[in-house]
Amino acid sequence: MNRPSDSFLRLGPALGLLLALCLATLPTCTNTATQLNQGLASISAELEQLLRGDRLPNEHLNAIRQVHVANSLTFDPTVRRPVEIVREAIRGLAASDYTNWRDTAFTLQLLSSLAREHPVALIRAEAVDAVASMGRWTFEREVDTGDWASQAELIAALRVIGDVAGSSESDPSRSFEVADAIRAIAAYDFENGSPLPDTVSSRVAGRDLVTRLRHTRAGLLPITGSVLDAYLVDPDVLSAADRCCVALSASIVRLTLGAAALLDRSEIVRESAVRLLGTVPYEGGRPVIERVLRDDTEPSVRRQAVFAIARHGQDIAGAALIAALRDDTATVRGAAARQLQALSGEQFGDDRRAWIQWWSERPSSEDGQPLPDSPESGR
């Protein structure tokens, strides 16, 4: 079994464990992804690392640090109005101008961690809004990476990063190798795993998104941290790092919103997350919204899911909206009927049978959705 080098320890707990598990299990384990999932499932130290680090010092980050007890998410009892201070700082981070993509990606990592882990719901909700707001800049620069990198290519790339991590001077002979390693990290599909069947519970689906989110943030840590600073003076390495920051930041935005919509314990956060999911370019967002519309226990959240799914258009949203016409709550049923009428131009109100008839007679599409009276559709 290969023993990871000590240089991994300088990369921080999340990435260090990711690299260690990759290298330790590669020769003996046929399912490295399973090992990574198990190893990263309990990581929460990443947020503490981001909070106590000196990367990107500014007034907003300092405000967040200063209202918490050192290296924790517990408020300092001597600070007055800590929730308001943190929410204002989060809004400031989202509205700041950043001079490079590394700073933008670092801030998104921090906001994503706050959205997932902070104990105060109002702060998580503010962080979710900020993540989506910053995502708009990222989506504008997102480009198709071409062929996805394989898991073997990712592991090879992480080995290169581990070898050069923390070097005080760059080795010109390795700069091309480092740039290629960063491009491989950018081209790895952290975001999309194997599709989950509809029979899987929303909680299981949400935990799957959280695992992918943690992997994505771990993959970005060496780029946004300081361990590659010696190599980032090379234009090719810097260009690769910028592209990696854009690609992985876009995934972090989408996964943060999806995980919050399915798993957050506060209806305020879930409502905000599902609303924002309808506004971002995210192929995986539709099944998340449909799960929320079908399974969430709060009518206000399901109602927001109605509006979010309707943004996908008639062919994609029709079946889910018709299924929502049998929701237990009148406000959800009314919202679904109004969205169906707006999308179709038909005036069937909340007459579910009429909408099913209309849906079955509409021109065929390639979406392959079941009719809304099938067992897997609706509550």
Image (cartoon, rainbow, N blue to C red):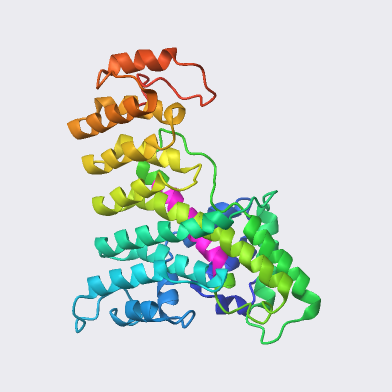
Q: Is residue 22 above or below residue 295?
A: below
- Residue 177 on image: x %, y %: 76, 69
Residue farthest to the bottom, as pictured: 168
> Which residue is nearer to you in this view: 41 or 190?
190
Q: How many marks?
A: 0
Left or right placement of residue 119 versus residue 343 in this view: left
Answer yes or no: is residue 286 visible. yes
Answer yes or no: is residue 2 visible. no
Residue farthest to the right, as pictured: 173
The quadrant in which residue 58 appears is bottom left
The quadrant in which residue 312 appears is top left
* Residue interval drawn in magenta: 206-221
- Residue 224 on image: x %, y %: 55, 72
Residue at 46% over, 65% down: 108
Q: Is residue 177 above or below residue 229?
A: above
**In terms of secondary structure, what is the magenta stretch mainly?**
helix
> Which residue is nearer to you in this view: 24 or 141?
141
- Residue 216 on image: x %, y %: 53, 59
The quadrant in which residue 232 appears is bottom right
Residue at 45% over, 61% down: 134
Residue at 64% over, 50% down: 144
Left or right placement of residue 72 versus residue 246 in this view: left
- Residue 66 on image: x %, y %: 31, 82
Is residue 294 on the magenta stretch?
A: no
Q: Is residue 276 above or below residue 156?
A: above
Residue at 24% over, 41% down: 297
Is residue 207 on the magenta stretch?
A: yes
Quadrant into which the N terminus falls: bottom right
